C-alpha cells in the first residue's frame, strides 16, 4: 500500500491547472454558473440556468466526513450507467501515474491542494480530461458536493493559441507557484503541441507561433517571448 499522502496528487493538480482554467473559462461562456441546476444521472445531463449539458458524474464530497467518493463506488448508482462507467478510466492511471487516489473508492481529502474552490474541485479538474470531459461543474446538494465532468459538444476544449498561451500559463503560475515547468509541459501534452528545450528554456510550437518560456535558477518563469502570426480579422 502506498504512503497515504496527497503529494503526487497535488503536483498533478498543479500541472493540469492551466488546462483546467482554460476549460472553466470556456464553460462560463456557455452557461451562467451561478444559475440553478438540475441533475439527471440516468440521462447523463445537468441543466444549468436552463441549459442542458451532457455530463459524467465524477464523484462526490461529503460535508460531514470531508471524503471523496468516486461515482463508480457509490452504491446509490449503477457503475455501468453511461454517465458513470467512463469515470473508471481514471482508475487505470493510478499505478502508472503513482496516484493511489484514482483507484481508492473513498478517501479523506484533507491535505488536497486547494485552488480556491475546495479539495473536491481539485480532484475534479484533474480527473475531467482523463475521462473525456472538458470542464467540470460542482453542484451543492445539501449534504455534499457533486462534481460532474462536462462532455457536451457545446463546450469543446479551446484551441491553443499563441496570443493566449502566456496568459494561460501565468494565471496558473500566479495561483499555484512552484510548478511552472510541469504546467507548461502538461498544457502542451493535452493540446498535442510540440515542445523542445532544456532546464532553462522550453519552446512551445502553437501552429505558426513559437513561444519560448524561460526559467530562472529556481525554476520560475522569467519571460515568455516569441513571434506571433497576424490574427485574422473577427
Image: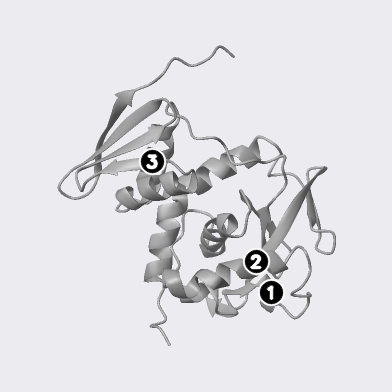
Pointers 1 and 2 in contact (CB under 8 A)? yes
Residue holding disc 1: 72
Q: Is residue 45 left or right of residue 180?
A: right
Residue at 19%, 44% in the rendered image: 200
Chain-order first, disc 1 or disc 3: 1
Residue at 33%, 31% in the rendered image: 211
Q: Is residue 4 left or right of residue 158?
A: left
Q: Quadrant of the C terminus?
A: top right
Q: CA separation, marks 1 and 3?
A: 35 Å
The residue lying furthest to the top in this view is 233
Circle 1 crowding by C-alpha within 10 Å: few under 14, some 14–19, many from 20: many
Q: Quadrant of the N terminus?
A: bottom left
The answer to whether residue 99 of the structure is visible from this angle is: no
Circle 2 crowding by C-alpha within 10 Å: few under 14, some 14–19, many from 20: many
- Mark number, residue 87: 2
Circle 3 crowding by C-alpha within 10 Å: few under 14, some 14–19, many from 20: some
Q: Is residue 159 above or below residue 216?
A: above
Looking at the rendered structure, the number of numbered marks drawn on it comes to: 3
Element type where label 2 sits in the image: helix
Q: Quadrant of residue 66?
A: bottom right
Residue 92 drawn at (x, y percent): 55, 72
Residue at 40%, 54% in the rendered image: 15
Residue 28 drawn at (x, y percent): 64, 39
- Using the image as rendered, state which of residue 149 and residue 94 is in the foreground: 94
The answer to whether residue 162 of the structure is visible from this angle is: yes
Mark 2 or 3: in front is 3
Residue holding disc 3: 194
Q: Is residue 154 above or below residue 219?
A: above
Residue at 46%, 59% in the rendered image: 114
Amino acid at each position: 500500500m502506498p504512503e497515504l499522502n496527497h503529494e503526487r496528487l497535488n503536483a498533478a493538480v498543479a500541472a493540469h491547472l492551466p488546462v483546467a482554467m482554460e476549460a472553466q473559462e470556456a464553460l462560463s461562456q456557455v452557461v451562467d454558473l451561478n444559475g440553478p441546476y438540475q441533475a439527471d444521472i440516468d440521462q447523463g445531463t445537468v441543466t444549468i440556468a436552463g441549459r442542458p449539458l451532457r455530463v459524467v458524474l465524477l464523484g462526490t464530497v461529503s460535508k460531514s466526513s470531508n471524503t471523496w467518493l468516486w461515482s463508480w463506488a457509490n452504491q446509490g448508482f449503477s457503475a455501468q450507467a453511461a454517465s458513470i462507467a467512463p469515470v473508471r478510466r481514471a482508475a487505470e492511471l493510478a499505478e502508472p501515474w503513482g496516484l493511489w487516489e484514482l483507484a481508492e473508492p473513498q478517501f479523506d481529502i484533507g491535505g488536497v491542494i486547494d485552488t480556491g474552490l475546495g479539495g473536491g474541485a481539485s480532484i475534479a479538474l484533474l480527473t475531467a480530461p482523463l475521462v473525456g470531459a472538458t470542464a467540470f461543474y460542482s453542484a451543492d446538494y445539501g449534504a455534499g458536493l457533486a462534481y460532474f465532468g462536462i462532455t457536451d459538444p457545446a463546450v469543446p476544449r479551446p484551441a491553443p493559441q499563441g496570443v493566449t498561451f502566456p496568459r494561460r500559463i501565468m494565471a496558473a503560475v500566479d495561483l499555484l507557484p512552484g510548478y511552472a515547468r510541469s504546467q507548461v509541459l502538461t498544457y502542451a501534452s493535452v493540446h498535442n503541441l510540440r515542445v523542445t528545450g532544456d532546464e532553462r528554456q522550453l519552446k512551445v510550437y502553437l501552429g505558426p507561433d513559437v513561444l519560448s518560456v524561460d526559467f530562472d535558477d529556481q525554476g520560475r518563469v522569467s519571460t515568455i517571448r516569441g513571434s506571433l502570426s497576424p490574427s485574422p480579422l473577427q
